[in-house]
Amino acid sequence: MTPGAPDSAVRVAIASSDDVVIARQKGRALAMEIGFTASEATLIAAAISELARNIVRYAGAGEMLLRDDGNGMLLMVARDQGPGIPDVQAALRVGFSTSGGLGMGLPGVRRIADMFEIVSNGSGTTVTVGKYKR
Amino acid sequence: MAVPILKQGDVLIASIQLALTDVDLVMLRDALVEKVSNYRTRGVIVDVTALDVVDSFASRTLRDLAHMIRLRGAETVIVGIQPDVAFAMVQLGLTLENIATALDLEEGLAFLAKTNRRQ
Amino acid sequence: MPGLKQEKVQQRSNRDENATALLSELVAHFRELRTDLRQEWAQRITKAQLLTAMTEDEVFTEATAVYDQYVEALETGTFESLQAYARNLSERIIPRGVETDEVVGIVLLLRDVLARSLFAKYQHDFAKLNRILDAYEPAANRVANTVAVGFVQERERIIREQQEAIRELSTPVLQVRERLLILPIIGAIDPHRARQLTEQLLHGIRATRGKVVVIDLTGVAAVDSSIANHLVQTVEASRLLGATVIVTGLSPSIAQTLVNIGVDLGKMNTVGDLQGGIEQAERLLGYRVVQITHDDAAATAAN
């Protein structure tokens, strides 16, 4: 994989809590490669951790796709074919630090994201998060 | 991957060695709660120096841990949160309210000693 | 009327074809006279006292490269290669002290030298000269533009990098006593700077085992809610590292902004001024500062 090349991407299959750790470690490495600071890379790793965990917890299995979009943005796509989030609005609602958002950590991720998209229905869920390098 | 738990007087010290999965974290929580019940413990220190990320699950689990341990009469101190990890936490809105935090093991022990004196 | 429109399109494409043919003609001409025109240009550069920061040899080398790139851009109509070259050239000459007006100046001089050679060649065919210039001018102007913009962009990039380097080198986190840190904030803070300050503070707390931090805002008149939020985050993150934060020098405006974003000022540790903040910090750390009187000082000196 050549860093910075438009089609350079890291794909991590998510099916267990071990995969959540792998995904966030790879995410941190990719972020550093692209030129994010260590501090930003940690934030990105935390966001990936949230997204990957939601896949394990609510869909059982799915994948995380991480890539440099070529314009200084790191794209993180969490995709699964699970039953979908029944109430997306509730999942995005900011409440108490860990109980708001149905415990999925999405309000926090959305807050730090430069780009945030969520599509969820009976065929599955796709969360797309983008973060720009400063 | 079990986290080693040491006993130093009436303080339990759990040092997380590397990136912990959710499963490991929950196991650690349960192990600590059990040990606090079995030994006469007045304090628990969880050293997260080697933890690469603290997200909402880790934050919630640490809070549960502190709560359950408090119910058993002991205080918890989280030590060793890395600067970047702390920054990421607050940006994500995770604050570990109502849990004592200290810089490192030394500070954590000093905190517990002070709290003990007050009691 | 469809007929007329078709005719206009046809005319335009005829003109384009002619323009292409003319461009090829003048590119061939520029290549043929390369040595002479380049020489003339170099002489004009010296006469105009441009690129004085460079030696004659250097000017010649760059002049050759610029000339060839110029003609190639005219020929291909694509400017990526020229753009890349312009940025590369700028990267090399900016540290030597070459200014924007010099770079624009030499490109315009080349444009003039080439134009005059066209006048010389086609002076006997005024109509042709006009058509040649019609082909030449837009291309030449685009070249001048590309080089100038490339130079300015490179300059801006270098300035940004230098600013960043200065910011990173400057350590605004001061250790005034063991375990007591002060972070004085002065002037306007943008979100980028705010994040940088937070990172520097947190790393400073870890490095010096700071227990109390005084963040002084005396030098800041007002902040917007996003920066106010950063301040709150900084206080919270410091607590996660076991440090207590005292905020001093809060202007009424900043206090109001904090209240507006939902901060309970009663819960935030604030003191009016920096001195008061340091005194409180010392008390928290268990210091007792005693002022030595004149008699004490004399007694000490006598021993």
Image (cartoon, grey):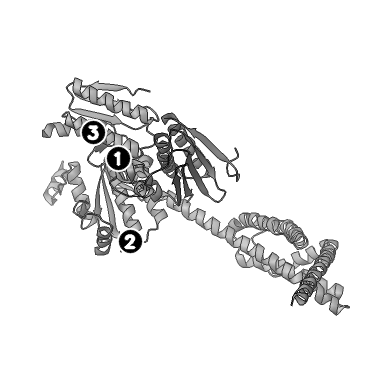
Q: Is residue B75 above or below residue C122?
A: above
On whether disc 1 and disc 2 are found on a single subunit, the reply is yes
Q: At label 2, which amino acid type do we have? A: Val
Q: At label 1, which amino acid type do we have? A: Leu
Q: Are marks 1 and 3 in contact (CB under 8 Å)?
A: no
Image spot of residue B31 (x, y percent): 27, 24
Image spot of residue A58 (x, y percent): 40, 37
Q: Residue furthest right?
A: C124
Image spot of residue B92 (x, y percent): 36, 46
Badge 1: residue crowd in 10 Å (few <14, some 14–19, many ≥20)? many
Whole-Å distance between the Cαs marked 1 and 3? 17 Å
- Compare residues C96 and C78 and report the one nearer the observer: C78
Q: Which residue is mark 1?
A: C241
Q: Please, what secondary structure does the residue beneath circle 2 have? A: loop
Which labelled disc corresponds to residue B66?
3
- Compare residues A39 and A100 and report the one nearer the observer: A100
| Disc 1 versus disc 3: nearer the observer | 3
Q: Please, what secondary structure does the residue beneath circle 3 have? A: helix
Badge 3: residue crowd in 10 Å (few <14, some 14–19, many ≥20)? many
Q: Please, what secondary structure does the residue beneath circle 1 have? A: loop
Q: Chain of mark 2?
A: C
Q: Quadrant of the N terminus of chain C?
A: bottom right
- Compare residues B87 and C41 and report the one nearer the observer: B87
| Disc 2 versus disc 3: nearer the observer | 3
Q: Chain of mark 3?
A: B
Q: Chain of mark 1?
A: C
On whether disc 1 and disc 3 are found on a single subunit, the reply is no
Which labelled disc corresponds to residue C199?
none
Q: Which residue is mark 2?
A: C223
